[in-house]
Image: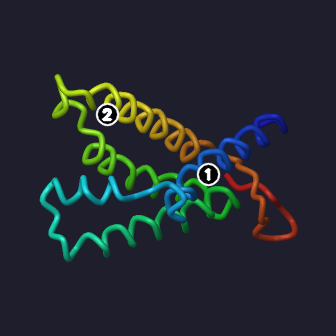
C-alpha cells in the first residue's frame, strides 16, 4: 500500500474509535440504551453488569483501534458488539407509524454504516501503528 493509504486508514481508525470512546466514557448518555435493554426483557439486576461490560469493551477496543494495537481484532470486537446492540436499540420496524420511526430508521442505518467501516478496517492489511510493536517495523499485515 502507498503511504497515503496507510495514513487514510490510520485517520479512519481514530475517527471510528472516537464514537466508541465517547460512548464508553459516558460522554454520550446511556440512559436510553439502559431503558431499551430493560424494555427487551433484560432483568434489572443484570443491566448494570451489561452496561459496564459494554462500556469496557468500547473503551478497550476503541483505544486499541485508535492506537493501532491489534486494530483488526479491535474492529471485529466492536463489530460483534455493535450488530446486536443496533438490533436491540434501533428496532425501527417496531416503531412503524410512530413519531420515533424516522429517528430509529436513521440510527439503525447509521450504525449499519459503522459496521461497514469496522469491517473495512478489519479486512485492511498493512496498517500503521501509532504505538509500534517493535523498533524494526511499524506496519503489520
Residue at the (61%, 51%) spot, across then down: 18
- Res. 117 image quadrant: top right
The answer to which image quadrant residue 9 occupies is top right
- Please state which of residues 23 and 8 is positioned toward the viewer in this rendering: 23
Residue sitting at the far front: 99
Residue 110 position within the rendered picture, expressed as x and y whole percent measured from the top left: 44, 33
Q: Quadrant of the N terminus?
A: top right
Q: Which residue is mark 1?
A: 18
User: Residue 100, relative to residue 26: is it above or below?
Assistant: above
Left or right of 13? Residue 77 is left
Left/right of residue 134 with respect to residue 105 in the rendered view:
right
Question: In the figure, 81 relative to 100: above or below?
Answer: below
Of labels 2 and 1, earlier in sequence is: 1
Residue at the location (58% across, 44% down)? 121
On the rendered structure, is 122 left or right of 90? Answer: right
Task: Estimate how packed mark 2 is, as few (under 14), some (14 to 19) or many (20 or more) residues with alpha carbons within 10 Å.
Answer: many
Q: Residue at x 17, y 22 (%)?
A: 97
SS at mark 2 in the image: helix
Residue found 27% across the figure and 32% down from its top:
100
Mark 2 vs mark 1: give the one in front: 2
Task: Name the residue nearer the viewer: 140 or 55.
Answer: 55
Percent position (x, y) of residue 63? 62, 63
Front-most of 136 and 132? 132
Q: Which residue is mark 2?
A: 104
Amino acid at each position: 500500500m502507498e503511504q497515503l493509504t496507510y495514513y487514510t486508514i490510520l485517520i479512519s481508525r481514530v475517527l471510528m474509535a472516537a464514537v466508541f470512546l465517547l460512548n464508553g466514557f459516558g460522554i454520550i448518555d446511556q440512559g436510553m440504551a439502559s431503558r431499551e435493554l430493560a424494555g427487551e426483557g433484560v432483568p434489572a439486576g443484570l443491566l448494570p453488569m451489561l452496561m459496564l461490560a459494554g462500556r469496557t469493551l468500547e473503551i478497550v477496543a476503541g483505544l486499541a483501534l485508535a492506537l493501532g494495537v491489534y486494530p483488526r481484532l479491535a474492529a471485529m470486537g466492536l463489530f460483534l458488539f455493535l450488530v446486536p446492540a443496533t438490533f436491540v436499540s434501533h428496532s425501527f420496524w417496531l416503531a412503524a407509524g410512530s413519531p420515533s420511526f424516522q429517528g430509529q430508521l436513521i440510527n439503525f442505518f447509521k450504525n449499519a454504516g459503522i459496521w461497514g467501516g469496522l469491517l473495512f478496517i478489519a479486512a485492511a492489511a498493512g496498517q500503521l501503528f501509532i504505538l509500534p510493536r517493535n523498533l524494526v517495523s511499524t506496519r503489520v499485515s
